[in-house]
Image: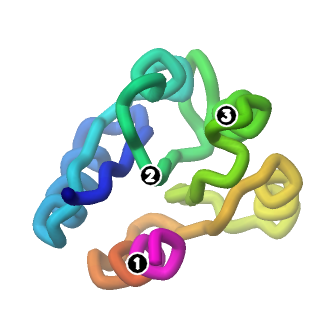
Amino acid sequence: MSKKIITVDDSASVRQMVAFTLKGAGYEVLECQDGQDALNKINGAGAQMVITDLNMPNMNGLELIKALRAKAEYKFMPIVFLTTESQADKKEAAKAAGATGWIVKPFKPDQLLAVVKKVLG
């Protein structure tokens, strides 16, 4: 059974690029357009990981991580930021909220896959 990853980004082109990269490596992908959409879809989705943008409408990536970490079933799920932000204070806030990792856009497909393999084992 392939592992399922939820990708959360308000940019359709970024979601498509991430999904294309992950599907090409044999992962299942569930695409969400913002944090609220991800929260609505994650229950029962059987996902093993979340890759999320930071800046999104409705619910941003930090709010999403905090909401997921508050639920027992997602306390230890790998959650990686994929964002254009690279400031140390944003990374610290993400880490404090419970982010597992951080990838800066634009990303290289092999870089994304290396992070996914590292956190999913």
Q: For the residues marked 2 and 1, what is the alpha-carbon distance in whole angstroms? A: 12 Å
Q: For the residues marked 3 and 1, what is the alpha-carbon distance in whole angstroms? A: 21 Å
Q: Which residue is mark 1?
A: 117
The answer to whether residue 76 is left or right of residue 49 is: right
**Type of the residue with mark 3:** Leu
Q: Residue at x 55, y 31 (%)?
A: 56
Q: For the residues marked 2 and 3, what is the alpha-carbon distance in whole angstroms? A: 13 Å
Nearer the observer, 115 or 12? 115
Nearer the observer, 120 or 54? 120
Position of residue 81 measured from the top left corner of the image (x, y, whole percent): 58, 56
Classify residue 59 by image quadrant. Answer: top right
Sort mark 2 into few (<14), some (14-19) or many (20+) by Cα contacts within 10 Å.
Answer: some
**Type of the residue with mark 1:** Lys
Nearer the observer, 38 or 62? 38
Q: Which residue is mark 3?
A: 68
Classify residue 54 by image quadrant. Answer: top right
Identify the mark nearer the N-term, 2 or 3.
Answer: 2
Q: Residue at x 68, y 67 (%)?
A: 86
The answer to whether residue 82 is left or right of residue 22 is: right
Q: Of the numbered discs in the image, which one, if any, rests on residue 48?
A: 2
Q: Which residues are magenta?
A: 115-121
The answer to whether residue 3 is left or right of residue 87 is: left
Give the farthest residue toward the left. Answer: 24
User: Quadrant location of the N terminus?
Assistant: bottom left
Nearer the observer, 120 or 101? 120
